[in-house]
Structures are given as C-alpha cells and as structure tokens.
C-alpha cells in the first residue's frame, strides 16, 4: 500500500481524542473561564444543537424585556396586554482545521523524534493551536471585527468562523483620561488624537461605571460566588500598564484576591482541576473597581495609525504614531455577550505519506461565533449588542 490510515475509523479513538482536545479548556484563562452552557447567563454561551444534525446555521432566541407600565387600580389586564417579542439571530458555522506532516525520515532520526514521539508532540501542538484559534475568533467577534484581521489585510478571508458585526453605536466609547484624571469622550475613533488625554485609568473606569448603569437597554452583569453582580472588563496589557502607573491603583491592588466564580452560573465542565466552581478563583483579575472586574487579556485588539477597527473610513488618527502609540479596544462583558455554535467536535486524523515513511496528523472542527444582538424576528434588522461594550483608548508601546 502507498499509505496507511489508522484511528480514523475507530469512534472510541475519536471520542477520546475529542475529550483530550478540550483539555486546555480545563485551565482557567481570562476569557474562556466565562464560557458556560445555555442558560448559565455567562458572557460566552456554548450551543451544541448542530452537532450530528444537518444544516450549517443555528438560531439563537432572546425574549425582549417587558416595558409597559402595567395597569393601575381596578384596571383590566385584558385589552392591555404587552406584545411578547422574541428576537432571533442566526449563527453560520464554518470549518477550522490544520495538519502537520513530518519533514522527512532523516529529520526524525537526527532530532531523536521517532514516529510515536512525533505524533504525540503534534497532537499536543494541534490542541493548543485549536484553543488559540477559538480565543482569537472570540476576540474578533466581541470586538466587532472581521475574521483573522481581514480589516488590515493580515489574514485570510476564507476563514469564516466569525459572524462579524460592528459594535452598535451606543455600545462603543472612544477617548480616555489625562494624567490628572479628566475624562474626555470623543465621537469617533479618528478623534482619539492625543497620547496624553485619551489614556486608560481609574477615572475612566468610574465614568464607564455610571454609563453602564444608565445604559438603556442595559447590559446585564454576571453573578459571582459572594453574590455580587459585576461586569468582567477585559483590558489590553498596555492599558493594564497605564492603570498600574496611577498612584491610587494601590488601594485596589488586593480587591480581586478572593473573587470566586458563582457555583450556579459558573457550573461549567472546566476550571481548575480539583476545585469546585465556587472555589475557583477568577483567573487574571487584578482589581475590582466599582462594578467591574478588571482582567488583562492579551487577546484585546489594537491598531496603529492608518489602521481601522470598525470600517475603512474610521481610521486611527495619524497623531497616534505608528510603532510608538496605538489604540487598544477593551471589552466590557455581560450576560450572553457572544455565542459559540458547535457543529462538529474536534476530530483527529492520522496518515502515513510516501510509502509509510512520513507520519502526519491533522484536526478539524465546525463552529461559528457571534455577538449577542437584538434582531427583529420579522424584518431581520439587527439592533443593539446585548452583552458587550467596547472602550477604545490610546496606549504607549
């Protein structure tokens, strides 16, 4: 035979490898720790209805909150009913895969990497690759960007796992604060033109705390183990650096030390091994300021002069010097900020090439990610993001 395939047809091997593929999710990470099953009210909701089912779309349903004032004394309910509206939004599922083939038999020999070692090594690397791709897609999804940096031409447009939707106008803020704490909010990305007046800091956090409370319709916070309702705020590492430079940050330095996930909404199938959800600390949290859990995350997007976040006409101002300064997009998350629709679990494929001399291993999956948005059930018109707010500031680095 010219080649030999093995393990592919054995469902036991497929199932076992799929479980191993998901093992990285058991480690607490800044974003993936907030993924939960449907009904968990976590920021990221996992939907599995498409697994082993035909079709390439999954429909999310969201009931619109009631808004009538109701009836008064001796009023009749009949004839004064409020219309119950259920929004729906479709998430299209795409394919994501990768494979590795040994360079040559001689290469395996001189690196002391035999066939078994090669397959084991790249099994692990493919699992890590898969986790990275999902985290990248969630970053682009929540930020309202194209798949794999297509806005600035850094990636491939044939990757379609992100159902792209730009931030709704009242869910994105541009600006920041200066060193004395004065907050300046500007109208558009291009108006962020100062590297001293549009920075990230405590005063901006307090300003956004008020804005989130006044927002209508509001973004629902999530519940933590001590009963508090808070919004996770994922910030860029350079925004973290600016935040830590403020002298009054010291008073918040230990505020997130004992923060734990809620035993109900956090009852997911991953977390720190050996710890119950209620015992699991919130990974990466550096402070609780106001009603926000501040969590640095390297997945937060940034852009330099001439690049864009939302559209080709909304560019980063030339005052944000390329290579010295940039604009970073942080993400405030609430319930149902995004959905992950899984169409096929990760699968493992192994094959021998060139008369069995070169082993290869590959994996693929079917999934799609989308922001939670209001959507009219009849017209299909999209409205506000229901669970994420973007905040853009200038950063140095």
Image (spheres, helix red, strand yellow):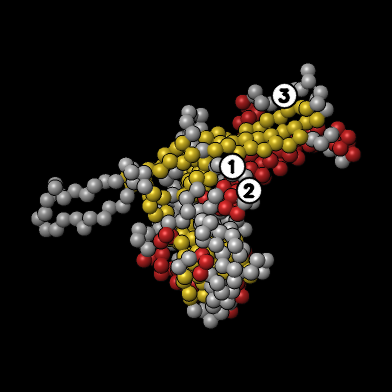
Q: Disc 3 designates what residue? A: 5
Mark 3 or mark 1, whichever is nearer to me? 1
C-alpha separation, residue under disc 3 versus residue under disc 1: 27 Å
Q: Position of residue 302 (x, y in %)?
A: 59, 61
Q: CA distance from mark 1 to mark 2?
A: 9 Å
Which residue sits at x=51%, y=79%? 181
Q: Looking at the rendered structure, which numbered label has been put on residue 155? A: 2
Residue 221: x and y, percent?
Answer: 43, 58
Q: Determine the image quadrant of residue 8.
A: top right
- Position above or below: 94 against 77: above
Q: Furthest residue to the bottom?
A: 180
Lower position in the chain sequence, tag 3 or tag 2: 3
Front: mark 3 or 2: 2
Q: Secondary structure at mark 1?
A: loop
Q: Residue 98, position in %: x, y?
A: 67, 38
At x 75%, y 32%, the residue is: 360
Residue 159 at least partly seen: yes
Mark 3 or mark 1: whose residue is earlier in sequence: 3
Residue nearer the viewer, 286 or 198: 198
Q: What whole-number distance in Å separates the C-alpha atoms at marks 3 and 2?
A: 32 Å
Q: Callout 2: 10 Å neighbours few (<14), some, many (20+)? A: few
Q: Which residue is located at x 51 percent, y 69 percent?
A: 191
Could you tell me if residue 258 is visible in this image? no
Percent coordinates x, y for residue 290 in the rendering: 46, 69
Q: Residue pushed farthest left?
A: 74
Pointers 1 and 2 in contact (C-beta within 8 Å) = yes
Q: Dot 1 corresponds to which residue?
A: 159
């Amino acid at each position: 035979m010219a080649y030999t395939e093995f393990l592919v047809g054995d469902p036991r091997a497929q199932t076992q490898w799929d479980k191993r593929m998901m093992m990285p999710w058991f480690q607490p990470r800044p974003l993936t720790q907030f993924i939960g099953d449907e009904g968990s009210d976590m920021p990221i909701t996992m939907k599995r209805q498409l697994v082993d089912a035909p079709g390439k779309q999954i429909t999310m349903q969201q009931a619109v909150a009631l808004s009538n004032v109701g009836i008064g004394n001796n009023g009749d309910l009949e004839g004064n009913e409020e219309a119950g509206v259920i929004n729906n939004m479709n998430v299209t599922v795409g394919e994501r895969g990768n494979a590795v083939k040994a360079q040559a038999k001689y290469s395996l020999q001189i690196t002391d990497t035999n066939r078994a070692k090669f397959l084991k090594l790249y099994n692990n690397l493919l699992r890590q690759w898969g986790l990275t791709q999902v985290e990248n897609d969630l970053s682009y999804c929540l930020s309202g960007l194209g798949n794999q940096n297509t806005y600035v031409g850094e990636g491939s447009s044939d990757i379609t796992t992100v159902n792209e939707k730009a931030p709704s106008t009242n869910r994105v803020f541009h600006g920041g604060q200066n060193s004395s704490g004065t907050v300046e909010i500007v109208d558009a990305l291009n108006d962020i033109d100062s590297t001293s007046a549009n920075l990230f800091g405590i005063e901006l956090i307090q300003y956004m705390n008020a804005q989130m409370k006044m927002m209508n319709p509001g973004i629902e916070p999530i519940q933590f183990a001590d009963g508090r309702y808070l919004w996770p705020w994922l910030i860029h590492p350079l925004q973290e650096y600016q935040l830590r430079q403020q002298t009054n940050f010291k008073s918040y330095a230990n505020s997130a030390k004992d923060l734990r996930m809620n035993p109900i909404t956090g009852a997911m199938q991953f977390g720190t091994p050996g710890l119950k959800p209620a015992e699991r600390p919130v990974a990466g949290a550096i402070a609780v300021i106001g009603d926000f859990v501040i969590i640095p995350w390297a997945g937060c997007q940034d852009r330099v002069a001439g690049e864009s976040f939302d559209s080709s006409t909304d560019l980063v101002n030339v005052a944000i010097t390329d290579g010295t300064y940039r604009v970073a997009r942080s993400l405030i998350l609430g319930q149902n900020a995004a959905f992950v629709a899984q169409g096929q679990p990760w699968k493992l494929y192994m094959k021998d090439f060139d008369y069995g001399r070169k082993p290869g291993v590959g994996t693929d999956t079917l999934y799609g990610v989308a922001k939670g948005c209001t959507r009219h059930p009849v017209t299909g018109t999209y409205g506000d993001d229901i669970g994420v707010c973007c905040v853009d500031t200038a950063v140095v680095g």
